[in-house]
Amino acid sequence: MRPFKYTGAQNKDQALQAFTATSHYLGGGTNLVDLMKEDVERPDQLIDINNLDYKKITSNENGGLTLGGMLSNSETANHPEVRTNYPLLSMAMLSAATAQIRNMASNGGNLLQRTRCPYFFEVSMPCNKREPGSGCGALNGMNALHAIFGYSDSCIATNPSDMCVALAAIGATVEVQQTDGSSRMIAFTDLHRLPGDRPEKDTTLMQGELITAIHLSEPEFADHYYYLKIRERSSYAFALVSVAAGLQVKSGVITKVGLAMGGVAHIPWKLTKAEAFLAGKKPTSENFEAAAALEMKDAKPFEANTYKVEMGKNAIVRALTQAYERTV
Amino acid sequence: MKEDDKFKEEVNLDKLSDDENIILDAMGLNGSNRRKFLKQVSMFSLGLYASSIFTSEIFADTMKDLPENARVLLNEVMVNLRVNKVVKPITIDSRTSLLDALRERLALTGTKKGCDHGQCGACTVIIDGKRNLSCLTLAATCEGKEITTVEGLANNGEMHPMQQAFLKHDGFQCGYCTPGQICSSVALLEEAKNGEASYVTEDLKTIKSGLTLSEEEIRERMSGNICRCGAYNNIVQAFKEVHTGNEEMPTWEFATQEQMDNAKNA
């Protein structure tokens, strides 16, 4: 690992003041420290923000919950109000990594975790995300784990987060602290960006900005929800394909749908077409299948990941079915 | 006393050395359980068992204060590491992981370096009551935290019940992942008591404290600790015994002298 200066910040002013263009904020470190050991991330300063007071879960004015940016994933997923009112979020978060990693990982850090593309991790390989202009090794290489939606010639990597898939399905607003001391709000679906010709930028955050909170709106999917995660082993693995499904059903008709996919794009992939199709329809397997087909017809797989199209279609149907049939 | 005499007679306890008796005490095997257990093992093998136990570190907290590397440290950080209830002030390079600080500076080599990338769980330690990966934790961030390693689980020379259960159920083969498995298991006991959910928990809403974990739940919750020897069945059994408080007989037994000789001559 390359040398860096360690700065322990006791409050946000100290953190913002210490920030320089080559600094990184240090949360749980489960992704950043690993990438530093791999020589992928090379900050010359780490600003430890673990003592910052963004560790609460509170009720907000929209009838929802606000999750602190520095609260751990395990404390968030197991908070009684999150489990009761946003079980889809709990379920997705609990599917991620392991108990040890969830104890360490912060909510803000989860939103900013970087891709698991093997070309990004291997510094001897070309990767536009790691080293802009060096090319994309996965484009004509080993691309079984890569995107089928929204990629560019520069980058076909996927976002690895489970939490983000659930947040895309249920909707959220991200609050960030700017370096000038003011704060701004970002709609969750605007936080991550497609690779385009600047794949080195995962998000729309500006330099030095710090995620302090995630605001959830009023809970909508507390009864019918399911997070389906398909992976190469049944635990402790990233998703090949995942689906977060939330439904509101009144008098046998779907009144509200939240649907997003993981493992298929550079961003948590919100299934807006399927959502629009299902609203006002009956929760039948025919409708679920039609919604899945509608969404997946735009998929453009690569040589090694064509399986994701069929798998994705089936995963959408299964997640919607499990969500609808859920009794607890 | 009478009960004890009868027991001695039945299992020829006179033939056991003091060390062997200590092992059985440490494994928490008393009275009838000790009798049942001894029926399964040959006295000779128990002796072999003794030597491996007494060279391990589980009985003693061997914390030292190794001298600083003579080379000039880059980006020095001073941190007071509180490990197994002892505070040690150390000056480290900012890059030092908690794992390296434990092993290289405090000589607490019970915590193992497996992958060093957060993929195997061998380095699991307990920080402020929660299991964490020491390989991805920078030692500089640990000021004021209460760290427990496998060396800190024993109490007054008596192994933690989870350590006893791992021995009894043979929850390991090579033993490299074991300190991490045990720390992880000890923390999981608390998570179950606190009523924390997992991905395989059916009902997230009415979950209460004092959970009794199914085997599926134990396997999901222990998935962060990889065992390349594949001792999972025995690990689950060991965890279950401590978790439920129900004594379970081990599924293994020692080879007899005859079997050992046959194997040697084969």
Image (tube, grey):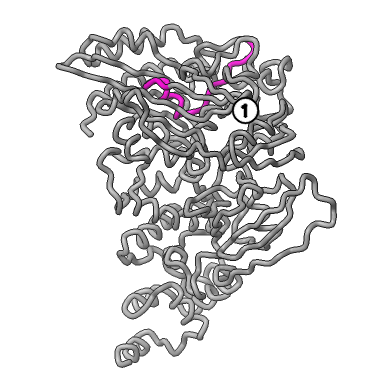
Q: Residues within 10 Å of mark 1 (few under 14, many from 20)?
A: some
Residue that appears at 77% across and 62% down = B67
Relative height, residue A44 to residue A191 (above, below):
below
Residue displayed at 72% across by 35% down: A45
Indicate the quadrant containing the C terminus of chain B: top left, top right, bottom left or bottom right: bottom right
Please indicate whether residue A266 sits to the left or right of residue B211 in the image.
Answer: right
Residue type marked 1: Pro
Describe the element under mark 1 as helix, strand or loop.
Answer: helix
Q: Is residue A169 magenta?
A: yes
Whether residue A311 is visible: no
Residue A6: x, y in percent? 70, 41
Judging from the image, mark 1 belongs to the subunit labelled A
User: Residue A85: horizontal and vertical position, in percent?
Assistant: 30, 31
Q: Against A178, is A17 above or below?
A: below
Q: Nearer the viewer, residue B200 or B21?
A: B200
* Residue named by callout 1: A118
Q: Give the residue at x 39% y 77%.
A: B38
Task: Give left or right: position of A21 versus A112.
Answer: right
Is residue A59 shown to the viewer in this render? yes
Look at the image and give the residue range highlighted in magenta. A153-172
Q: Nearer the viewer, residue B189 or A51?
A: A51
Which x, y percent locates residue B105? 71, 59
Asked if the magenta segment contains residue A260, the reply would be no
What percent of the width, then of the height, locates residue A273? Answer: 37, 8
Residue A18 picture quarter: top right
